[in-house]
Image: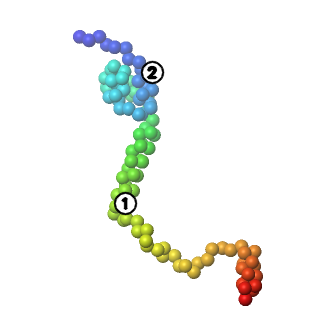
Amino acid sequence: MTRPTRVDWVKAERFYRAGIITTKMIAEKCDCTRQAIERRAKAQGWTRNLHGCITKVASEKQLTSSTTKDAINPVEPDKQSAAPHTVSAPVAPSDVHARQEEALTKA
């Protein structure tokens, strides 16, 4: 029969709360079982910070969905905008006055 090992629960808790590695990997690093980690976490109310994992998965999904969307609806760079060309941008009054004077001097 094997003798139980002393588990560094502070280290295990840090790994668990960080949420970066699985409970199985934590158990391997701390020389105990996955169930022991999960039991201790439940008993002491440890919560996992999964922000990093969630962000990683979300960015990967966004990458795959954007590449899939581009494959379905490819961008057509030669296609012109549907906006009318007669729409003018706002012009400062001093600019209008300068253009009128320039037109008068040319005529």
Position of residue 95 in the picture relative to residue 41 (left or right)? right
Q: Please tell me how crowded label 1 is: few (under 14), some (14-19), or many (20+) other residues with Cα within 10 Å.
A: few
Viewer-proximal residue, 18 or 105?
105
Write the residue at 42% across / 48% down: 59
The residue located at (35%, 32%) in the rendering is 22
Residue 21, quarter of the rendered image = top left
- Spot occupied by residue 64 in the image (x, y as percentages of width and height): 36, 52
Give the farthest residue toward the bottom.
107
Badge 1 is on which residue? 69
Residue 74 seen in this snapshot: yes
Q: Amino acid at mark 2?
A: Val
Amino acid type, callout 1 = Lys
Mark 2, Cα crowd under 10 Å, few <14 / some 14-19 / many 20+, is few
Q: Secondary structure at mark 1?
A: helix
* Residue 36 visible in the picture: no
Q: Is residue 4 left or right of residue 62?
A: left
Name the quarter where the N terminus is drawn: top left
Location of residue 6 by image quarter: top left
Query: According to the image, label 2 marks what residue?
Result: 10
Query: What is the C-alpha distance between the residues marked 2 and 1?
Result: 46 Å
